[in-house]
Amino acid sequence: MKLTTMHDAIATYVHDGDTVAIEGFTACIGFAAAHEIIRQRRRDLVLCRMTPDLIYDQMVAAGCARKLVFSYLGNPGVGPLHAIRRAVEKGIPAPLELEEYSHFGMVGRYFAGAYRLPFFPLYSYTGSDLPRVNPRIRFVESPYGDGPIAVVPPLNPDVAIIHAQRADVHGNTQLWGLVGAQKEVAFAAQHVIVVVEEVVDEEVIRSDPNRTLIPGMIVDAVVHEPYGAHPSYVQGYYDRDNDFYLRWDEISRDESSTRTWLEEWVYGVRDRAEYVQKMGPETWERLKPAQAWSHPVNYG
């Protein structure tokens, strides 16, 4: 059985200086895991992610990171990430190195890492300025006579943290809705922590095998953490808290107000359960999703 607490999963698998990928494209973003990393005061992390939105802004503000490996950086639909900007421009609270790719470039790095390839080729950097500022994006001659093609190196994080709808105690994890590169980053990583809204019986997983995105054989720890992706959303469990994304833009503009928020909502709570209680039932009622059930299928 791989079921454990968030505290113990982070304490066991996330160490100072590690390369950490907390994935989830718009949905299923692992804020509870990020907050536990902040509470345990991890330092010098290399944080990898497609669209490092509020989750990495908070981790950078807390002094966890020395480098971001990413594609697109911003508060989606709102504006810039002020804590990351302070770190890059002013070294507050610590200097921050950036390594930027396109979305497809990051996907390619995860693919190469998952399949243990030496690189991943893609055409989309032709005419782009990114190769000029990122020396890890290189060009090689196609062996098939197609001319030069860009390549990116594999990305193999020390630990991947994936939030999903449900898993069994063995780590067989099911995810639906907007799926990003979670499967690839899980296979690319040395260790995998899966955080889920529900822990279900193995029979539930077996009854719908096509939803099993991540097999238990590559999972090191399973954490049961309801509402663990807030303020992002988990399809079928709760909606995106758009109000919070707007509020974060105001909170994070000032270093002092950012620190005050971290003290109250991260350091000031023992765990995610206390965070959920502190948010109040009206929050979860407001974010309650509509009903849109999938039609059953016959696997017989």
Image (cartoon, rainbow, N blue to C red):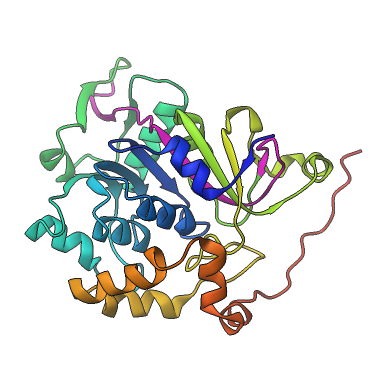
| Count of marks overlaid on the render | 0
**Residue most extreme to the left:** 90
Is residue 182 within the magenta segment? no
Q: Where is residue 139 drawn, in percent x and y?
A: 20, 27
Can residue 79 be seen in the rendering of this structure? no
Is 105 rendered above or below residue 189? below
Residue at screen point 80% across, 45% down: 201
**Residue most extreme to the top:** 143
Residues in magenta, as a range: 146-173
Tell which of 128 and 164 is nearer to you.
Answer: 164
Which image quadrant: the C terminus? top right
Task: Locate residue 273 relative to residue 153 in the image: left or right.
Answer: right
**Residue most extreme to the right:** 300
Is residue 168 within the magenta segment? yes
Task: Locate residue 214 relative to residue 29 in the image: left or right.
Answer: right
**Among the 4 quarters of the image, the one containing residue 267:** bottom left
Q: Where is residue 49 drawn, in percent x and y?
A: 36, 47
Q: Where is residue 150 drawn, in percent x and y?
A: 25, 31
Is 37 rendered above or below residue 193? below
Residue at screen point 46% across, 60% down: 26
Which image quadrant: the N terminus? top right
Tell which of 139 and 73 is nearer to you.
Answer: 73
Tell which of 270 and 228 is nearer to you.
Answer: 270
Residue at screen point 28% across, 42% down: 45
Can residue 91 be seen in the rendering of this structure? yes
Q: Where is residue 295 drawn, in percent x and y?
A: 82, 58
Residue at screen point 64% across, 33% down: 215
**Among the 4 quarters of the image, the one containing residue 277:** bottom right
